[in-house]
Image: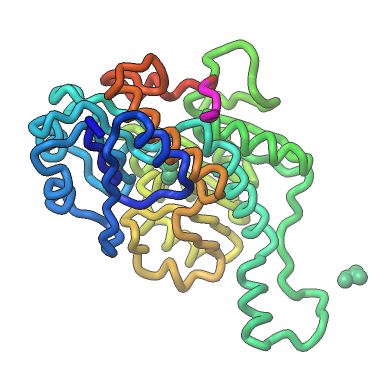
Amino acid sequence: GKYRVISTKPMPGTRWINLLIEQDCRLEVCTQKKTILSVEDIIALIGNKCDGVIGQLTEDWGETLFSALSRAGGKAFSNMAVGYNNVDVNAASKYGVAVGNTPGVLTETTAELAASLSLAAARRIVEADEFMRAGLYDGWLPHLFVGNLLKGQTVGVIGAGRIGSAYARMMILIDLDIAAYGKFLKANGEEPVTWKRATSMDEVLLEADVISLHPILDKTTYHLVNKERLSKMKKEAILINCSRGPVIDEVALVEHLRANPMFRVGLDVFEDEPHMKPGLAEMKNAVIVPHIASASKWTREGMATLAALNVLGKIKGYPVWSNPNSVEAFLDENSPPPA
Ligand code: GLV
Ligand code: GLV
C-alpha cells in the first residue's frame, strides 16, 4: 500500500479493513494489551511516516499528537465515536489534519440503551437480579421491589439532537409525555418527534419524572447537572446519562443518591473513566454500566467502517464522509449509514 494508516485498536468487523487495503492503504492495527494508550504510545505508533489514524475516545488527541501526525505527513484522523471531546479540533486544523467522527450509525443503539436504563432504573431490575442470585427470594410479597410506573409520566430530554430524539420516540411508545431542552436537531420546522419544547432547563428539571441527558460535552455542558439542579428534580425522579460523564457533577450526584433513596440513576458514562467517584458503586439506587451505549454489533461495525471512510476519503480526496478541518459537518443527520 501507498498510504500508511494506523488503527490504535482492533475494531469489529472486516469491512473497514477491506475498504482500506483495497484502496492502496497499508493498515497497521495496534494490538497492545493495554486498554488505554498514552500519548507516548501513540507517538511511537505514528513513527515518521503515517498518512492517517483511526483513534479511540479514550485517547487524548491534542496539540502533541496532531503535531506528531503532521510531522509524519498525516492528513486525516477519525475518532471511532460520535463524541469528540477528546479531540482538540483547533489543534488539528492548525496542523492541517482533517478530523472525522462517526454519527448516525449509533443513534438508535445508544437511544436503546438510554431506554433500557430508564426501565431498569424504574423497575429496579439490577437490584432484583442481585437479590435472586444471592438466594434471597423466599416468596412473593406485596412490597417486594416496588418501582415506578412510567405510563403517563413526563420524560425530559436534555440535548435534543439525533440521539435525544430517537430516545424520545422510544419513550413515547410507553405513553409518556416528552419535554425537551437544549440544542435541537432542527432549529425550527418539522420535529423528529412530538414533544414540548421547554423554554428553560428548570422547566424540565421541575416537571420531569425521567430525565435523559444527550448533549455533547463542551465548556457549556460541563457539570450541567450539579448540586443545585439535582435539588430541583423530583425526589423520585430518574436521571439517565448516556452522553459523557462530566456532564454530571458525580460527587454531587453520589451525595444526592445517598440523601434521596427514591431518586434513581442509570449511568453509562462517568466523570473520570474508568473510575467512579467514591460511594457510587455502593448505591442501590444506581444502575451502572461501562460505556456500552453504542455497543451493538451493527453499530460498532458501522462506526469502524465510517471511521475508515473518513480517513480514506481525506487521503484519496474523495468528496465523501471526510470534511476537511471540521467535525461539525459530520453532524449531519442525513448522512446515510455506510453501504
Ligand atoms: C461513544 O461514546 C461515542 O461518542 O461514540
Ligand atoms: C402478580 O404476580 C399477580 O399475579 O398479581
Q: Nearer the viewer, residue 19 or 334?
A: 19
Left or right: 5 as drawn, with respect to 167: left
Q: Residue at x 15, y 35 (%)?
A: 69
Left or right: 142 as drawn, with respect to 36: right
Regarding residue 185, the answer to whether it shows in the image is no
Snapshot quadrant of residue 178: top right
Q: Residue at x 74, y 49 (%)?
A: 150
Left or right: 311 as drawn, with respect to 150: left
Q: Was residue 61 drawn as part of the magenta stretch in this picture?
A: no
Q: Nearer the viewer, residue 257 or 297?
A: 297
Q: Residue at x 12, y 51 (%)?
A: 40
- Where is residue 44 drawn, in percent x and y? 12, 49
Q: Residue at x 14, y 23 (%)?
A: 94
- Where is residue 221 drawn, in percent x and y? 37, 36
Most common secondary structure along the magenta stretch: loop
Q: Nearer the viewer, residue 198 or 304?
A: 304
Left or right: 233 as drawn, with respect to 2: right
Q: Nearer the viewer, residue 276 or 310?
A: 310
- Image quarter of the C terminus: top right
Q: Residue furthest top?
A: 189
Snapshot quadrant of residue 68: top left
Q: Was residue 337 drawn as part of the magenta stretch in this picture?
A: yes
- Where is residue 310 drawn, in percent x and y? 36, 28
For the record, the magenta segment spans: 335-339
- Image quarter of the N terminus: top left
Snapshot quadrant of residue 5: top left
Quadrant of the picture in which ligand 2 is shown:
bottom right
